Image (tube, rainbow, N blue to C red):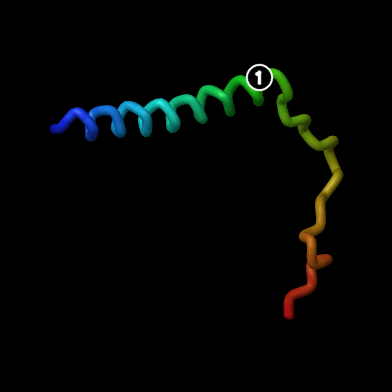
Amino acid sequence: MSGGAVIMMIIAITIVWGGLAAAIVMLRRHPDEPEPPGVETAPPDGGMRR
């Protein structure tokens, strides 16, 4: 591989793994709160199919 290809590969790997790490950190700081039991969410269209 050429030097440019290696640099592009390193940049791509950094972006992918950096995004994964950022997502994990965000979810650790602000976890999704579970819904209380018995609460159901309706789809955006109100549950009506056309």
Q: Residue furthest front?
A: 4
Specify whether 4 is left or right of 49.
Answer: left
Q: Please, what secondary structure does the residue beneath circle 1 have?
A: helix
The picture places residue 13, in percent across and down from the top left corner, at: 36, 29
Q: Could you tell me which residue is drawn at 66 percent across and 19 percent down?
A: 28
Q: Which residue is mark 1?
A: 28
Amino acid type assigned to the residue bearing label 1 in the image: Arg
The percent coordinates of residue 50 (x first, y second) are: 73, 80
Q: In x, y percent, where is residue 47?
A: 79, 67
Q: Position of residue 9 (x, y in %)?
A: 29, 32
At 79% from the left edge and 73% from the top edge, which residue is drawn?
Answer: 48
Q: Is residue 20 above or below residue 48?
A: above
Q: Quadrant of residue 49?
A: bottom right
The residue lying toward the viewer, choosing from 5 and 37, is 5
39 vs 24: above or below: below
Residue at the (81%, 37%) spot, across then down: 35
